Amino acid sequence: MLAALKPAGKVKPDLLVGLGEADDAAVWRLGPELAIVESVDFFPPVVDDAWTWGAVAAANAMSDIYAMGGEVLFALAVAGFPREMSKAIIAEVFRGGSEKVAEAGGVIAGGHTVVDNEPKYGLCVTGRVHPERILVKGGLRPGDRLFLSKPLGTGVITTAAKDGHASAATLAGAVASMLGLNRVAADVARESGAKGATDITGFGFLGHAGEMVKASRAGISIVAARMPLLPGARELAAAGHFSGGMKRNRRHVDASFGRDLVIDPTVPGDLVGLLAESETSGGLLFSVAPERARSVLDAFRRRGATCWEIGEVVREPVIRVTA
């Protein structure tokens, strides 16, 4: 919807990233070596536990700062709750968000709440980044190697869980992934000289990868067999436990790319569905020069984190999925 807005007045030279080239967050330059990164995100509960919902929503909101290569400074809570909702439950939501921001090295500095029939919670996050080290969706370069810092599957698992079809262990795996910060991924991407990055959330892998392709005017070629998946996600996808967002995402990518979306017919349909399924607090998708690829995986291992090399950037502005 923000695409309907047009920058008003004179161009602000210190607005390095804004409505002109839509990205994961806005960036405003304060000086030669410092810029502010700003983003806001909130959503209804994705799990039943109040603390976990607050923490996941916070991790998801801060992910936009990491997707720009930034560091989290502080955040303002943004929330709406039904009038009859227990104050104890609301307090747990706020506590979950606050503790997750603290884990990121930041602090909740305030916020705003309203009465709303459907509960919602999230953050307006402020971070910092060096103006010359900003990661943007338009930073893909032909020949770069593509990396993904979290497995896919949170969307199909949480959808199945709402209907009682996901095991406790499968849901616990998805929750653990959603609670994970993209802090290490942002650090490694910056250190590795990455220019292009985004986080995988509501538009699914194909949707967000497509945004990078459009912005970069370069394409991606990924290997389906290399895509990391959460335990149980593939089985639930095969059983058809997709959210409504999956079909909307797939239609949008199909309409945007047409023949430039090339999916090998031998790639199973359930796996294609997982590529289009909405994710919550997903990983960073970023690219680095081929000579740095090995050092990326080594850097993640040294930090006790995971990452997967899933493909490469190609010259033609296409999305290609091979088996």
Image (tube, helix red, strand yellow):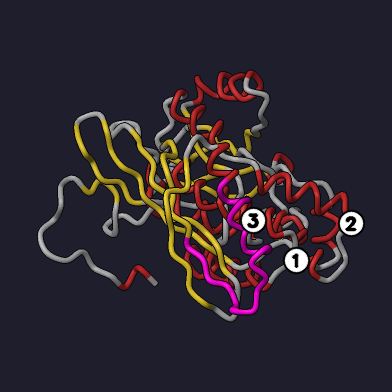
Mark 2 residue type: Ser
Residue under circle 1? Answer: 159
Q: Horizontal and vertical percent for residue 300? A: 62, 25
* Residue name at image x 31 percent, y 42 percent: 36
* Residue 1 located left or right of residue 200: left
**Is the residue marked by circle 1 packed among few (<14), some (14-19), or many (20+) residues within 10 Å?**
some
Q: Which residue is mark 2?
A: 167
Tell which of 165 and 252 is nearer to you.
165
Residue 84 on the magenta segment? yes
Q: CA distance from mark 2 to mark 1?
A: 12 Å
Q: Residue furthest left?
A: 10
How far from the left and from the top, in percent, is residue 233? 80, 54
User: Residue 279 lies in magenta, yes or no?
Assistant: no
What amino acid type should be assigned to the residue bearing mark 3?
Ile
Residue 316 visible? The answer is no
Between the C-alphas of marks 3 and 1, the distance is: 25 Å
- Helix, strand or loop status at disc 3: strand
Q: Indicate the amino acid at tag 1.
A: Thr
Does 299 appear above or below 164?
above
Residue at the spot 55% in from the left edge and 61% down from the top edge: 203
Q: Which residues are magenta?
A: 78-98
Q: Residue at x 78, y 56 (%)?
A: 268
Foreground mark, 2 or 3?
2
Mark 1 and mark 2 in contact (Cβ < 8 Å)? Answer: no
Q: 211 or 182: nearer the eye?
A: 182
Cα distance between the residues tagged 2 and 3 = 31 Å
Residue 273 is left or right of residue 165, and the answer is left
Please identify the quarter of the rendering in which residue 162 is found: bottom right
Assign a secondary structure to mark 2: loop
Q: Residue under circle 3?
A: 263
